[in-house]
Structures are given as structure tokens and as C-alpha cells.
Image (tube, helix red, strand yellow):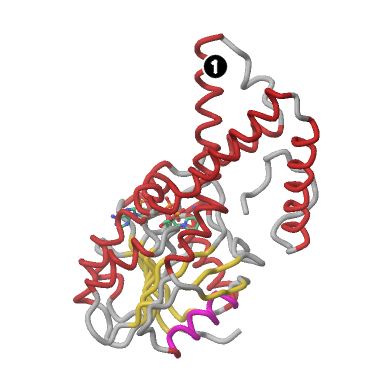
């Protein structure tokens, strides 16, 4: 593979950044990788694992001289980081982010960037329920989508180079506008997470009020929910605070569908339930055919997609 950037700075050294570092190293995509994280513990871990060549106590130091800067911190931390690094960015460099929400990140970051910096927001649709520098691995992005949401004035070359980086790490890249991204993600990721959090909360409540053995007997449906509901609380708090409109829209639709099924159960309408579940089963088949999951049963023990 060819080197795409001489120096990359990773701001945040958790699951996504460390996976990028592993993948960039494996494929020789970056000459040098500098990193910054909030705590000394994470910075030390990143050096020990060897995913970065240098760590820096401040984000401003880490971005000095970098050709590509990747913001891989929780969405709620993007504005402060952008404000800090703005004056220290190398003229003409590219800055991207990996935040799970796009419009809020653009609003938080863009005002802090000097003229001549190329901001190309992005979001890898890949992750696990694990966090931190030790959780990353080189193949995380393979055959996963990486959505890029260029701004109307994003220049072509920096966007193409970032696309090449994502593709070289194994991802399939698609470009779309930020509002569309946020609505799509509300359907395929954000609302499902909220439902999983809620279902696990219901089981926990039941366990407490009825001394029920829900954990002991948890079957695959509930176990899948618990895996999703084990996702990082900071990240997911920020997702719901910043993708509010789209999530509320999808939740409203979800509630309507739930009432339809609730009514079918109450009325003993088996045909309705059968027809509904047949339709949803076809969606699962479509996901497998698109290569976004395998048909192998893993009962919620495997990696998240
Ligand atoms: P993570 O494993 O929890 O890592 C977050 C990193 O950000 C940590 O290194 C943390 O440092 C650092 N950090 C937090 N606040 C900071 C601040 N104010 N200044 C500097 N560093 C700070 O998180 P992640 O899963 O990699 O997620 C990072 C981003 O990727 C988020 O925006 C998330 O929405 C997005 N994303 C996540 C997934 C997923 O499934 N996890 C998928 C796609 C996109 P310390 O360790 O020192 O606290």
C-alpha cells in the first residue's frame, strides 16, 4: 500500500482511533502517528501497545505538523478540542472526525478552523461495545461502511485522499449530506440502542421488584440487547443529546408500530403477527446478502457490527 499521509494526529485514543492506528500501520498508510488522549493512563497505554509513535499532553502539541488530524473523542468533546487545536493546525492540512452524529459535530468544529484547513467529516459504521486503547484491532473497518459528509466547500483532493485512506483500511465509502446521515443513523443505530437500553432497564426493574431470574435464564434475544446496552455511556449520552430531532422522529414511528403489534396480540390477530414477522425476516436476509453480517448464530457473543 502507498503512504497517504506523512503525519497523522489522533485526538482521542480509544476503540476507533486505536483501530485506525492498527489498520494504518498494517497497510503502511501513515509515515508517523502522533496521539493525544485526556488521561495520562490512556496516553501511556497507547505508547505501550505501540499504536502511536509519540503521545502528547495537549491536543495542540499532537497536531503540530500533521497532514491529517482525526478527532476521535466523544461528540460532546469535539468543540473544546477544535477550539484548542485550531490555531496550531498545519496550513492546508485535512481534519476529519469519526463522530456518530454529523450535523452537531460540524456545528461544533467548523467555526474553530482557520481558512485553508480542509474539514471532511466522517463516520465509520463499525464498533464494538468495548472502549479504550486496548479494544482496537486492525480489521474493525473491513467490509464496513464509512460515511463521509463533505461540506459544500470541501475541496475535491482532500476528500478523495480521505476516501482512499478509509478504503485502504478495508471500508466501503459513501458520501452523503449530514442531515441525511443523522436520519439514517437514527434508524439503523441510535434508536435501536435506545430500545436495547430500555429493554435491559425493564428486565433490571423486574429482577428487583420480583426477584426474577432474568439474568440467569437470559436467552439470545435478551443477551443481544445486553451486549448493545453495554455500550459506552458517554458516547451514547452524547449521541442522544446531539441527534435529538431525528431520534425523536424515529422513536415516534417506533411507538406507533409497537401499538400496532400490541393491538394484534390483544386481539389474537395471528395473521397480522405472522405477516409482520415474515416482512422483518426478509430484512435480516437482506443484511446478510449485503455482507453486513453472517448467518452464523452467535447468540450475541460476537463482535458488534
Ligand atoms: P472510546 O474508546 O471511549 O475513546 C474515547 C477517547 O477520547 C479516549 O481516548 C478518551 O481519553 C478521549 N477523550 C475523551 N474526552 C476527551 C477530551 N475532552 N479531550 C481529549 N481526549 C478525550 O471511544 P470510541 O468508541 O473510540 O469513540 C470515539 C468517537 O467515535 C465518538 O465520537 C463516537 O461517537 C465515535 N464512534 C464510535 C463507535 C463505537 O461503536 N464505539 C463507532 C463509530 C463511531 P481517555 O481514555 O484519556 O479518557
- In the rendered image, the residue lying farthest to the bottom is 157
> Looking at this view, is 126 or 135 the one in front?
126
Which quarter of the frame holds ligand 1?
A: bottom left
Could you say whether the residue bearing mark 1 is in a helix, strand or loop? helix
**Does the magenta segment cover residue 235?**
no
> If the image is split into quadrants, where does the C terminus sit?
bottom right
Q: Is residue 47 visible?
A: no
Residue at position x 72%, y 55% in the image = 293
Where's residue 126, x and y in %?
57, 59
Assess mark 1: CB under 8 A from ligand 1?
no
Where's residue 23, x and y in %?
56, 69
- Residue 253 vs 265, above or below: the answer is below
- Residue 270 vs 257, above or below: the answer is above
Q: The magenta stretch spans which residues?
A: 157-167
Where's residue 178, x and y in %?
43, 68
Badge 1, how many Cα within 10 Å: few under 14, some, many 20+?
Answer: some
Is residue 248 toward the left or the right of residue 227 in the image?
A: left
Where's residue 6, x and y in %?
42, 84
> If the image is split into quadrants, where does the N terminus sit?
bottom right
> Looking at this view, is 38 or 162 the one in front?
162
Residue at position x 79%, y 44% in the image = 278
- In the rendered image, the residue lying farthest to the top is 210
Q: Main secondary structure of the magenta part?
A: helix
Residue at position x 58%, y 34% in the image = 226
**Does the magenta segment cover residue 163?**
yes
Which residue does the numbered mark 1 point to in the structure image? 206
Is residue 177 toward the left or the right of residue 222 in the image?
A: left
Is residue 8 toward the left or the right of residue 274 in the image?
A: left
Q: Is residue 280 visible?
A: yes
Amino acid at each position: 500500500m502507498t503512504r497517504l499521509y506523512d503525519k497523522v494526529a489522533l485526538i482521542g485514543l480509544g476503540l476507533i482511533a486505536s483501530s485506525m492506528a492498527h489498520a494504518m500501520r498494517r497497510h503502511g498508510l501513515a509515515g508517523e502517528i502522533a496521539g493525544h488522549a485526556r488521561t495520562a493512563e490512556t496516553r501511556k497505554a497507547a505508547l505501550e501497545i505501540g499504536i502511536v509513535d509519540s503521545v502528547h499532553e495537549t491536543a495542540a502539541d499532537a497536531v503540530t505538523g500533521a497532514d491529517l488530524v482525526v478527532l476521535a473523542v466523544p461528540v460532546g468533546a469535539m468543540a473544546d478540542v477544535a477550539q484548542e487545536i485550531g490555531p496550531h493546525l498545519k496550513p492546508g492540512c485535512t481534519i476529519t472526525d469519526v463522530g456518530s452524529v454529523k450535523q452537531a459535530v460540524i456545528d461544533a468544529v467548523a467555526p474553530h478552523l482557520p481558512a485553508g484547513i480542509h474539514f471532511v467529516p466522517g463516520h465509520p459504521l463499525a464498533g464494538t461495545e468495548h472502549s479504550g486503547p486496548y479494544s482496537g484491532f486492525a480489521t474493525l473497518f473491513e467490509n464496513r461502511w464509512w460515511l463521509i459528509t463533505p461540506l459544500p466547500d470541501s475541496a475535491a483532493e482532500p476528500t478523495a485522499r480521505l476516501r482512499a485512506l478509509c478504503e485502504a483500511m478495508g471500508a466501503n465509502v459513501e458520501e452523503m449530506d449530514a442531515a441525511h446521515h443523522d436520519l439514517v443513523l437514527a434508524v439503523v443505530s441510535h434508536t435501536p440502542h435506545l430500545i436495547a437500553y430500555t429493554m435491559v432497564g425493564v428486565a433490571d426493574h423486574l429482577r428487583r421488584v420480583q426477584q426474577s431470574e432474568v439474568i440467569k435464564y437470559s436467552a439470545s434475544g435478551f443477551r443481544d440487547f445486553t451486549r448493545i446496552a453495554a455500550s459506552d455511556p458517554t458516547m451514547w449520552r452524547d449521541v442522544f443529546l446531539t441527534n435529538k430531532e431525528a431520534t425523536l422522529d424515529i422513536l415516534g414511528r417506533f411507538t406507533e408500530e409497537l401499538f400496532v403489534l400490541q393491538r394484534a396480540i390483544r386481539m389474537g390477530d395471528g395473521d397480522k403477527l405472522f405477516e409482520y414477522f415474515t416482512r422483518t425476516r426478509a430484512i435480516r436476509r437482506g443484511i446478510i446478502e449485503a455482507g453486513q453480517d453472517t448467518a452464523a448464530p452467535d447468540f450475541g457473543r460476537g463482535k458488534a457490527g
